[in-house]
Image (tube, grey):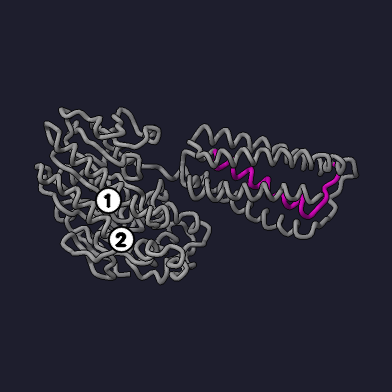
């Protein structure tokens, strides 16, 4: 086997590894999407075939019928790959980078086959035998590649079976407290929270108007729905009973460069000011504006228990939230009840911090951030949607409203709980110093420090959490049906001390 053939082999490995880690794991999180069960099976079978190919090519010279079998395996691999590409195109919208990667993988594999098949055909003419062979560093790399694809192949096959247990609940009951046939404007409707909220509202028969910058991103929203790309498209005489304002540049998807910080602030202020301007010109003004904010409003407060009456300490997150809330409060002067929803860590499979943690934890590489002593104030996505509906439907609810479950936990306890839910260890901490070196203030405010937040206003208003405790919330999301249900948790805002 020539060095050129081996170069093509490991070019395939490099591109396939990028496709798997970046697209399948980090971006699309296919292992936790029930809709992709067939794709996962294809990935699993294909990876097991790759593992056999790497071992046979790296450490042996198959001859006779064994060489013919290897040729058949390589051609079958080509069929599986093309089938996989068709399945991916059919079931999900592929990003441009994934399409380019698929094209390069196909071309590279074609050239590899053109070079290796004549070699294997020559070996096929010899008496059947599995002659040992070694190709120096290439053989060593084959072992590493075989182990990697074997691990991912077995995991993907297991994940395909697991998807049967991951069943999203009917969203309609989440907004059961609303009066019928409300007309509701949702900004940020294509985000993690917005999509679940819109699905619940539309399913319950409410009239939903969704603001999005790009109509194409709203293609997956349920019908019937009205989509606008600018609030100026809403007529002065339009009926809007409530507004839920969730729009803004994602805060945790990149380094906080000066340009990123400006986008984070400006995006929130621009949409919120546009919402207030819409309220001002509507002939019939909405009753309530539920405007997004975050528990970053409180700053970094250590072990102090923070309810809605608590003050904040200055940091970038607090600056963003303070300006965002101040812009929303202008709607009060127009006679609108304003609820400032301070959202914690939202637990969901479709996005957010939990979805990014699943891959390392599933492979046994998870653990706490730093010392793991800081608090994580979390909330199940469905409870957050229920809380938004509760805020709309409760006339006496105004001002700040903490969107967090009543039992926050320390980061180390969160890591242990996620490890238990996945039946994996959670022993590998992410050291604080490298995180601070690479991420700067982002690391301190979002990864290494936090807030111990109590949902006092929600509980006082009569709201009851479906998922007050972390173990139950994770079991619900991850489809765990075998663990014993935990005892009924207190709804009086008890705080975990672990």
**Residue underneath mark 1:** 466
Q: Would you say the magenta stretch is mainly helix, strand or loop?
A: helix
Q: Nearer the viewer, residue 122 or 245?
A: 245
**Residue underneath mark 2:** 316
Left or right: 357 as drawn, with respect to 54: left
Q: Residue 373, how many percent across, how many down?
A: 36, 70
Is 461 situated above or below 33?
below
Q: Nearer the viewer, residue 281 or 169?
A: 281
Q: Residue 140, how many percent across, how many down?
A: 73, 59
Q: Is residue 2 magenta?
A: no
Left or right: 335 as drawn, with respect to 108: left
Determine contact: label 1, label 2, CB under 8 Å: no
Neighbours of disc 2 within 10 Å: few (<14), some (14-19), many (20+): some
- Could you tell me if residue 162 is visible in this image? no
Bounds of the magenta segment: 39-64
Is 309 situated above or below 78?
below
Quote the CA–CA distance across marks 1 and 2. Answer: 32 Å
Left or right: 355 as drawn, with respect to 8: left
Q: Residue 274, how many percent across, how many down?
A: 23, 40
Residue at 25%, 59% in the rendered image: 297
Q: Residue 408, how many percent across, how many down?
A: 29, 62
Mark 1 or mark 2: name the one nearer the start of the chain: 2
Q: How many marks?
A: 2
Left or right: 49 as drawn, with respect to 250: right
Residue at 62%, 47% in the rendered image: 15
- Which-is-in-front pick, marks 1 and 2? 2
Q: Which mark is residue 248?
A: none
Q: Is residue 51 magenta?
A: yes
Q: Quadrant of residue 410?
A: bottom left
């Amino acid at each position: 086997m020539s060095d050129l053939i081996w170069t093509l082999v490991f070019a395939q490995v490099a591109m396939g590894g990028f496709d798997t880690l970046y697209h399948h794991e980090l971006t699309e999180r296919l292992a936790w999407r029930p809709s992709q069960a067939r794709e996962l099976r294809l990935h699993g079978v294909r990876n097991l075939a790759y593992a056999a190919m790497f071992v046979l090519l790296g450490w042996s010279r198959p001859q006779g019928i064994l060489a013919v079998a290897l040729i058949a395996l390589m051609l079958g691999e080509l069929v599986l790959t093309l089938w996989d590409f068709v399945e991916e195109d059919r079931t999900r919208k592929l990003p441009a980078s994934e399409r380019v990667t698929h094209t390069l993988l196909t071309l590279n594999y074609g050239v590899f086959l053109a070079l290796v098949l004549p070699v294997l055909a020559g070996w096929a003419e010899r008496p059947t035998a599995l002659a040992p062979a070694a190709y120096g560093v290439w053989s060593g790399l084959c072992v590493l590649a075989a182990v990697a694809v074997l691990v991912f192949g077995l995991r993907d096959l297991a994940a395909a079976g697991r998807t049967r247990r991951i069943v999203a609940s009917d969203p309609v009951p989440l907004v059961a407290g609303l009066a019928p046939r409300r007309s509701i404007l949702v900004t940020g409707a294509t985000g993690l929270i917005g999509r679940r909220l819109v699905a619940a509202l539309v399913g319950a028969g409410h009239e939903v108007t969704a603001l999005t910058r790009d109509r194409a991103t709203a293609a997956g929203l349920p019908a019937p729905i009205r989509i606008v790309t600018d609030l100026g498209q809403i007529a002065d005489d339009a009926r809007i009973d409530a507004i839920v304002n969730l729009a803004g540049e994602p805060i945790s998807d990149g380094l906080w460069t000066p340009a990123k910080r400006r986008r984070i602030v400006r995006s929130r202020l621009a949409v919120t000011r546009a919402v207030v301007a819409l309220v001002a010109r509507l002939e019939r003004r909405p009753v309530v504006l539920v405007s997004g904010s975050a528990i970053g409003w409180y700053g970094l407060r250590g072990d102090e228990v923070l309810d809605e009456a608590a003050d904040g300490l200055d940091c970038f997150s607090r600056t963003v939230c303070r300006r965002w809330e101040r812009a929303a409060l202008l709607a009060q002067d127009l006679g609108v009840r304003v609820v400032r929803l301070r959202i914690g860590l939202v637990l969901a499979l479709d996005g957010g911090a939990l979805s990014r943690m699943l891959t390392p934890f599933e492979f046994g590489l998870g653990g706490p951030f730093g010392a793991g002593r800081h608090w994580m104030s979390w909330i199940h996505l469905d409870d957050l949607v229920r809380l938004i509906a509760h805020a709309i439907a409760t006339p006496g609810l105004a001002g700040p409203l903490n969107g967090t479950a009543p039992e926050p936990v320390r980061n180390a306890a969160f890591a242990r709980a996620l490890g238990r839910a996945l039946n994996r260890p959670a022993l590998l901490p992410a050291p604080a110093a490298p995180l601070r070196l690479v991420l700067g203030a982002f690391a301190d405010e979002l990864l290494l420090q936090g807030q111990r937040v109590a949902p006092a206003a929600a509980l006082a208003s009569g709201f009851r959490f479906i998922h007050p405790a972390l173990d139950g919330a994770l079991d619900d999301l991850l489809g765990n049906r075998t663990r014993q249900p935990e005892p009924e948790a207190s709804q009086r805002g008890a705080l975990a001390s672990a």
